[in-house]
Image (cartoon, rainbow, N blue to C red):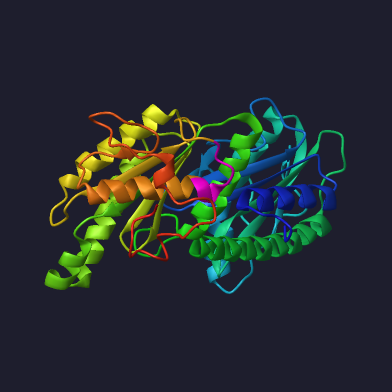
């Protein structure tokens, strides 16, 4: 679990490890969705029965079908006890049932599931994070294998505590990653994530010719709003524009929506044709012009699907989009300017008018236009 890079990998490692440790034929890790009152299966591992999937999209069960969850994780635990694992068999509660637990009625759903899926017994261990019930670990053995006993249930309780600690660590790492790659004001991706994804996208373009498009936009009028109405109002304008950008980005599959900093934003589209990206950028310009207090947006587009010459690096594509955006701002254009296009409705942005590879970067030196 410590080596996992994502929450999905972490819970799968937990299921695989618990199944092997308990010599089970099948294991699952589930999370309790309180708002839905359901136990949702995150991962299944081992010998899957018909209809079971490794990572199910929506395999979940109403918690009221498993009253032992409430009993073990609330009533008994709240009374000063600890969450214990228990065993279910085809005949009902196994030897691993915690002392004092109510028999019979609590286990009929699990017993039915064992029969339906050809399993002889299971051990169920609550997962507890930060002092609250989080979900459960479930490990089963096939018919004909030895039935779990009380020692197995005690071991499963220990494994559940280890897994809970691993899940907590994964959540902390995931939160750290989120903070590292997220703009705190708008909730969009930040420049750091754009740089990483753009490098990956350009490498993919070099490998298989995938179209990579970048829309760079500058929100007009932010300084005026900040100076006249205050930064709180300016922040609200940035948030509203971020929402508009997300809406337009949703028009394109596999698109990253980001705030680069200040009043600058971007869309990174990998795969869609250039015309679809330009259409989304046009919709962005139209919607931005309707924002209260704002003055529209200056929008530049650069795409490997346009005649812009070879794109040897991510920086090259970024500079082309940035140069197009600068032209849109200088011309007060209410439409996106597209690098490599010319015509009455598409202001010209020639390659020679963008900074050469390795030239000055307008994001650091904004005093003069690139060229």
**Residue 47: x and y, percent?**
77, 33
Magenta region, residue range: 310-316
Counting from the top left corner in percent of width and height, residue 1 is at 72, 57
Relative side of 197 to 118, left or right: left
Q: Based on the picture, tell me whether residue 313 belongs to the magenta stretch.
A: yes
Asked whether 336 or 252 is in front, the reply is 336
Q: How many marks?
A: 0
Q: Is residue 93 above or below residue 133?
A: above
- Name the residue: 52% across, 36% down: 58
Q: Quadrant of residue 203?
A: top right
- Residue situated in front as seen by the camera: 340 or 98: 340
Apparent side of residue 303 relative to residue 106 in the rendered image (left or right): left
- Tell me if residue 260 is in the magenta stretch: no
| Residue at the image point whose x is 85% and y is 47% from the top | 23
Instruction: Mark yes or no: residue 317 visible.
Output: yes
State the image coordinates of residue 131 (x, y, percent, origin top left): 55, 70
Looking at the image, which residue is at 43% across and 43% down? 352
Query: Does the rendering let one see residue 245?
Result: no
Most foreground residue, 184 or 76: 184
Is 188 placed above or below 41 here?
Answer: below
Nearer the observer, 72 or 311: 311
Is 356 left, or right, of 329 in this rendering?
Answer: right
| Residue projecting furthest to the top | 50
């Amino acid at each position: 679990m410590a080596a996992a890079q994502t929450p999905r990998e972490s819970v799968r490692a937990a299921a695989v490890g618990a199944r092997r440790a308990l010599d089970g034929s099948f294991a699952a890790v589930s999370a309790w969705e309180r708002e839905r009152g359901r136990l949702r299966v995150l991962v299944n591992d081992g010998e899957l029965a018909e209809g079971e999937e490794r990572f199910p999209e929506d395999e979940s069960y109403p918690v009221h079908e498993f009253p032992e969850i409430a009993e073990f994780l609330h009533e008994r635990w709240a009374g000063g006890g600890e969450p214990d694992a228990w065993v279910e068999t085809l005949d009902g509660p196994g030897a691993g049932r915690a002392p004092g637990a109510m028999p019979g009625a609590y286990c009929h759903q699990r017993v039915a599931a064992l029969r339906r899926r050809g399993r002889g017994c299971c051990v169920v261990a609550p997962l507890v994070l930060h002092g609250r019930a989080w979900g459960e670990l479930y490990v089963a053995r096939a018919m004909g294998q030895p039935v779990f006993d009380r020692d197995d249930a005690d071991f499963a309780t220990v494994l559940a505590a280890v897994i809970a600690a691993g899940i907590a660590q994964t959540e902390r790492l995931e939160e750290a990653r989120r903070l590292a790659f997220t703009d705190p004001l708008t909730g969009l991706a930040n420049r750091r994530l754009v740089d990483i994804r753009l490098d990956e996208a350009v490498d993919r373009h070099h490998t298989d010719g995938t179209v990579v498009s970048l829309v760079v936009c500058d929100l007009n009028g932010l300084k005026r709003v900040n100076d006249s109405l205050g930064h709180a109002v300016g922040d609200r304008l940035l948030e509203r524009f971020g929402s508009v950008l997300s809406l337009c980005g949703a028009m394109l599959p596999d698109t990253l929506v980001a705030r680069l900093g200040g009043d600058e934003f971007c869309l990174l589209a990998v795969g869609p044709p250039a015309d679809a990206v330009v259409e989304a950028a046009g919709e962005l310009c139209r919607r931005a012009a309707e924002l209260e207090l704002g003055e529209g947006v200056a929008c530049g587009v650069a795409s490997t699907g346009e005649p812009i010459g070879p794109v040897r690096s991510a920086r090259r594509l970024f500079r082309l989009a940035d140069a197009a955006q600068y032209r849109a701002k200088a011309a007060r254009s209410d439409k996106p300017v597209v690098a490599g296009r010319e015509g009455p409705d598409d202001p010209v942005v020639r390659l020679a008018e963008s900074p050469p590879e390795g030239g000055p970067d307008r994001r650091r030196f904004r005093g003069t236009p690139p060229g």
